[in-house]
Image: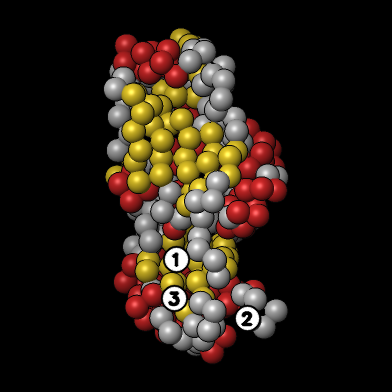
Amino acid sequence: MKPGPFRYLAPTTLEEAVRALGEHPDAKVLAGGQSLIPVLSMRLARPTHLVDLAGIAGLGEVEVSDEWVRVGALVTHARLLADEDGYAALPLLRQALRNVAHPAIRNRGTTVGSIAHADAAGEMPSILAITDGVVEAFGPQGRREIPASEFFAGALETTLAHDEVIEAVRFGRFPGGTTTAFLESARRKGDYAMAGVAVALTVDESGQITSARASFVSVTDVPGVLDLTGALAGRIPTDVDWSVIDDAVQDHIEPEADIHVSAEYRAHLAGELARRAFAQAAATHPGGNS
């Protein structure tokens, strides 16, 4: 199928983009288009206007500070994947981005667009959640910041107002002593994951766990964080039998069946991937086995 008719708008400032969205309530924002264009082609959405952000200066940068990795709205997955400063500051970004679709899609699709799409089957919403990230929104009243915990409202639904544009997202950096891992399982490389997990494990100077957190892909409606610190604090990572997290993982996730896999199998995958990811993070810690 082909998209329905629409008018293409190319603003050169955020103010122009916001004004266009306010004037056309059914307009859609276009950045990379890797989520939007298939929706239009299947006519699951039929906006009368598309507002393209490509001509707005300043949205294509990756910035690193002591606390954040800030990613502009036009930064592609491939650009962020290759960013060495971003990787050094937050290795989990690259660990997850390697699993996003195929190179052709990563070359066009944007990280912010994936987050705005709010599909819990996407990798990057889970990374925003586990890093306690922030969405920088720009609207008629100016700029505001939306914590990740308040941004995702439901499946493919966010708290962003229709006449707001995401200018950037900030991924929070982890404290010293943190190692991370990202694992997912898909029927074919590049397909949406049947299940996936991101983990962050923080260990103090004495070698004891001080924080253990996970977020999931494809097994929850809304990206969120499972905090396992209470069950693991004070333990030595390489001595942990990671099956101790099984019950907590199963209580946290809400897998659903589809034409590819049963809910039960998704639940099994999520548990197994979580165990493996934490074991991997433990082993790659400077005090671990590798």
Q: Which residue is mark 2?
A: 287
At horizontal 54% and vertical 39% (from top left) the residue drawn is 71
Tell me if 161 is positioned left or right of 44 in this view: left
Secondary structure beneath dot 3 equals: strand
Q: Report the residue at 55% width, 70% height from top.
A: 177
Kindly report which numbered mark, 2 or 1, lies closer to the viewer in this rendering.
2
Q: From the top left corner, tell me how far across and down residue 41 is, in percent.
A: 50, 26
Residue 214: mark in rendering = 1
Relative placement, left or right, of 221 versus 195 is: left
The amino acid type, in three-letter code, at marker 3 is Thr
CB within 8 Å, label 3 to label 2: no
Residue underneath mark 3: 210
Which badge, 3 or 2, comes first in the chain's sequence?
3
Type of the residue with mark 1: Ala
Query: Is 201 situated left or right of 49 in this image?
Result: right
- The image's mark for residue 126 is none
Q: Position of residue 3 (x, y in %)?
A: 49, 20
Q: Residue 96 appears at what percent x and percent y?
A: 58, 55
Q: CA distance from mark 1 to mark 3?
A: 14 Å
Drawn side of residue 217 relative to residue 155, left or right: right
Q: For residue 203, say whether it is visible.
A: yes
Q: Amino acid at mark 2?
A: Gly
Bin the neighbour count of mark 2 within 10 Å (Cα to Cα): few under 14, some 14-19, many 20 and up: some
Q: Quadrant of residue 138?
A: top left
> Where residue 168 appears, x then y in whole percent?
48, 35
CA–CA distance between discs 2 and 1? 21 Å
Mark 3 Cα within 10 Å, few/some/many (few <14, many 20+)?
A: some
Q: Secondary structure at mark 1?
A: strand
| Residue density around tag 1, few if under 14, some if 14–19, many if 20 or more, within 10 Å | many
Q: Is residue 26 above or below residue 221?
A: above
Rendered image coloring scheme: secondary structure
At 63% from the left and 43% from the top, the residue drawn is 80
